[in-house]
Image: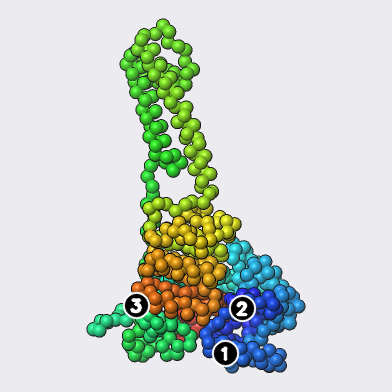
C-alpha cells in the first residue's frame, strides 16, 4: 500500500493500514522542513512507530513482506510532490493500492492520472473536496483503467478501481451527531436505515434492550469524570468494538452501543407557507398600505357608480383615469362627481410614494439576500459554529439539512464557507472569536451547542473555555489536532464541568478508517465514532460464500 499526503491524515491512514489490516505501507511525505507534525495515536503506538521508522526503511528495501504475515512497518520516502519518478521509486507499478490525500485537489488529480498510466489495475483512493469534480474524475480514471487492462472495471466489488472521498464529508456527520443530543447516527445501506444508539449501563434489576446486535462496549471509565475517553492505551478498560455474546454478558457496569433499524429518522418536512408570493418581498406595513389604497379605489368606483348611475366598469375606468390624473376636469359635472374626482386625485398622490417604497423595498430585499445576515434578537436553542473552512462548511450544510438553526462565527470575510452561508441565509458574525463580544453577538448564552472547528487548537480551546464560563451546561465539541492534547483537554473539562457534554474530535481520526477501507476495496457506507475510536460500515458481497450466505445480522 502506498500513501501520499502532506498532513495528519496521511500518518493516520498509514497507521490504520499497518495496525488494523497488517499491510505493508510506503508513506510519501514532504521533506522534514515542510512536513506537518505527525499526530500522536497513543503513547504505545508513538514509541513503536518511532523505533520502527528508524530501521524499517533499510529493511524494506531488501525484503518484500507477504500478505499473510505481519507487516514490519512502514517505509517513509520524503518528496516535495508525487511526481512520476517518485511514484516509480515507491513501486506504484507493483502496489495493490495508492491513496493520494494531499490537501490540494489539483496535486491529487495530477498524481492519480500519472499513477493510472503506470499501473492500470491499481486501486486508487483520492481525497477531493470538490464533490462534482470528484465524480467526473472517478469515471475518467475508471475508463482509463478499463482501456489499460483490456477489461471492464467492476464497481462496488473487490476490484473497485477508483474511490473519491472527502475527509470533510466523512467527518461532518460524526461532528454533527456529537453536538446534537438525540440525533441518530444513521447508516444508509441501499434504502435500509440503521442507526447506532448509545445505551447507558442498566440499573439493578433492569434488562437493557440489545437491539439487533451490540456493536461496542463503552470504556469502563466513560462514567468517571476523571477517566480517559476511550484512549488506546487504557487496555481492558477501553472500548471494545464488535464484542461477542460472552463479552457482552460478562461486561457489567459498562455502557453499550447497539444497532437498531429505523424506518425514518429524519425531521418532518417543513410546512408550506401560506400567503401570496410577494409576502417575502414586502413588509407587512407596506402590504397594508397597498391594501388600503386598493380598498379606497374600489370605494370610489362604487360611489361614482351610485352618483352618476353609470355602468360599473365604465365608472371604474373613469376612477382610474382620475387616480392617475389623465382624465378631463369635471367642470360641467355635478358636485358629487367633482368631489369624487378630487378624492381620486388625492388617492393618486398617496399611491406614488407607496409604489416608490415598494420598488425600493423589493430592491433592498434582493440586495440583502446576498449579504450576511445578523442573528435575530429572539434566537435561542441554536448551534454556534466557529470556523467556515473546509470542515466547517460541510458541517454547516449538514446542520441546515436537518433544519437546525445555526449562527456562524468567522474572522475571514473571504473564507471558503461564506458563499454557502449567504446562499443558505445563515446568520454570520464576522470577527475574531478570541475577542470580547464576538461570542455574545452569536447569542452563545442562549445556544444549545458550540462547535469549535477552526484550524487552530488554541483558538478552539479558548472559545470553549469562555463559553463554559458563560454557560456551565453548554454542549461543546472541539476540533483538536494532537491526540494527547485532546485527551488532556477532554479530561480536564469533564472534571471541571461534570454536568456538561464535552467531546474532542480529530478530523483525520474520523476520516482515516473510511480511506483505509476504500484502499482495501470495500464499499464504504459510513463511519460511526465510538468514544475515541471509529466503527466502519462497509458492504461485503456474500454470494458464493456458504459461511455467510443466508446469515442475519444476529
Residue 546 visible in this rendered orientation of the protein: no
Q: How many marks on residues?
A: 3
Name which quarter of the figure residue 107 lies in: bottom right
Q: Residues within 10 Å of mark 2 (few under 14, many from 20)?
A: few
Q: Work out which residue is located at the far top of the displayed protein and give it.
A: 332
In the rendered view, would you say 5 is above or below 383?
below
Mark 1–mark 2 CB contact (< 8 Å): no
Q: Residue at x 51, y 51 (%)?
A: 372
Read off the residue under disc 2. 37
Q: Secondary structure at mark 3?
A: strand
Name which quarter of the figure residue 347 lies in: top left
What whole-number distance in Å separates the C-alpha atoms at marks 1 and 3? 35 Å
Q: Residue at x 25, y 84 (%)?
A: 204
Mark closer to the chain start, 1 or 3: 1
Give x and y (percent) for residue 146. 66, 72
As rendered, which of 544 and 515 lies closer to the eye?
Answer: 515
Side of 296 relative to 454 (left or right) = left
Mark closer to the chain start, 1 or 2: 2
Colour mapping: rainbow
What whole-number distance in Å separates the C-alpha atoms at marks 3 and 2? 37 Å
Give the numbered dot on residue 199: 3
Q: Work out which residue is located at the far front of the displayed protein and give it.
A: 436
Q: Secondary structure at mark 2?
A: loop
Give the numbered dot on residue 47: 1
In the rendered view, would you say 370 is above or below 122?
above
Give x and y (percent) for residue 152. 63, 73
Give x and y (percent) for residue 329. 45, 11
Name which quarter of the figure residue 291 lies in: top left
Amino acid at each position: 500500500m502506498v500513501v501520499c499526503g502532506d498532513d495528519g491524515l496521511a500518518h493516520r491512514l498509514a497507521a490504520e493500514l499497518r495496525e488494523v489490516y497488517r499491510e505493508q505501507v510506503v508513506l510519501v511525505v514532504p521533506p522534514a522542513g515542510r512536513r506537518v507534525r505527525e499526530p500522536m495515536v497513543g503513547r504505545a503506538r508513538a514509541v513503536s512507530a518511532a523505533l520502527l521508522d528508524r530501521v524499517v526503511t533499510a529493511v524494506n528495501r531488501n525484503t518484500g513482506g507477504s500478505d499473510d504475515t505481519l507487516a514490519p512497518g512502514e517505509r517513509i520516502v520524503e518528496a516535495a510532490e508525487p511526481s512520476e519518478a517518485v511514484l516509480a521509486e515507491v513501486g506504484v507499478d507493483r502496489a495493490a493500492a495508492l491513496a493520494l490525500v494531499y490537501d490540494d485537489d489539483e496535486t491529487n488529480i495530477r498524481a492519480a492520472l500519472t499513477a493510472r498510466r503506470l499501473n492500470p489495475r491499481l486501486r486508487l483512493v483520492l481525497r477531493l473536496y470538490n464533490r462534482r469534480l470528484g465524480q467526473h474524475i472517478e469515471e475518467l480514471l475508471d475508463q482509463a483503467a478499463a482501456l489499460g487492462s483490456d477489461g471492464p472495471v467492476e464497481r462496488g466489488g473487490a476490484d473497485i478501481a477508483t474511490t473519491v472521498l472527502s475527509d470533510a464529508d466523512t467527518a461532518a456527520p460524526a461532528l454533527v451527531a456529537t453536538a446534537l443530543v438525540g440525533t441518530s447516527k444513521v447508516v444508509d445501506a441501499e434504502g435500509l436505515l440503521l442507526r447506532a444508539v448509545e445505551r447507558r449501563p442498566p440499573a439493578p434489576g433492569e434488562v437493557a434492550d440489545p437491539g439487533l446486535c451490540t456493536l461496542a462496549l463503552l470504556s469502563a471509565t466513560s462514567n468517571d469524570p476523571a477517566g480517559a475517553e476511550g484512549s488506546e492505551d487504557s487496555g481492558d478498560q477501553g472500548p471494545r468494538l464488535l464484542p461477542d455474546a460472552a463479552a457482552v454478558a460478562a461486561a457489567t457496569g459498562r455502557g453499550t452501543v447497539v444497532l437498531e433499524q429505523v424506518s425514518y429518522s429524519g425531521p418532518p418536512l417543513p410546512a408550506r407557507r401560506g400567503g401570496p408570493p410577494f409576502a417575502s418581498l414586502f413588509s407587512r406595513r407596506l402590504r397594508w398600505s397597498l391594501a388600503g389604497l386598493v380598498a379606497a379605489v374600489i370605494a370610489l368606483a362604487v360611489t361614482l357608480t351610485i352618483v352618476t348611475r353609470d355602468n360599473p366598469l365604465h365608472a371604474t375606468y373613469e376612477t382610474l383615469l382620475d387616480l392617475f390624473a389623465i382624465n378631463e376636469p369635471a367642470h360641467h359635472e355635478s358636485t358629487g362627481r367633482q368631489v369624487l374626482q378630487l378624492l381620486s386625485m388625492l388617492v393618486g398622490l398617496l399611491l406614488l410614494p407607496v409604489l416608490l417604497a415598494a420598488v425600493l423595498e423589493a430592491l433592498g430585499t434582493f440586495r440583502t439576500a446576498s449579504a450576511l445576515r445578523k442573528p435575530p434578537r429572539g434566537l435561542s436553542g441554536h448551534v454556534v459554529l466557529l470556523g467556515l473552512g473546509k470542515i466547517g462548511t460541510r458541517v454547516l450544510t449538514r446542520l441546515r439539512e436537518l433544519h437546525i438553526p445555526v449562527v456562524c462565527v468567522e474572522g475571514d470575510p473571504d473564507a471558503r464557507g461564506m458563499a454557502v452561508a449567504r446562499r443558505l441565509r445563515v446568520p454570520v458574525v464576522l470577527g475574531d472569536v478570541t475577542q470580547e463580544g464576538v461570542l455574545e453577538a452569536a447569542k452563545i448564552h442562549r445556544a444549545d451547542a458550540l462547535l469549535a472547528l477552526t484550524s487552530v487548537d488554541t483558538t478552539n480551546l479558548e472559545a470553549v473555555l469562555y463559553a463554559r464560563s458563560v454557560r456551565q451546561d453548554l454542549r461543546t465539541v472541539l476540533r483538536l489536532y494532537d491526540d494527547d492534547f485532546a485527551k488532556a483537554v477532554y479530561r480536564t473539562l469533564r472534571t471541571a464541568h461534570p454536568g456538561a457534554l464535552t467531546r474532542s474530535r480529530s478530523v483525520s481520526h474520523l476520516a482515516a478508517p473510511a480511506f483505509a477501507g476504500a484502499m482495501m476495496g470495500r464499499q464504504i457506507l459510513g463511519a460511526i465514532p465510538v468514544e475515541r475510536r471509529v466503527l466502519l460500515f462497509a458492504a461485503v458481497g456474500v454470494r458464493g460464500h456458504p459461511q455467510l450466505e443466508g446469515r442475519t445480522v444476529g
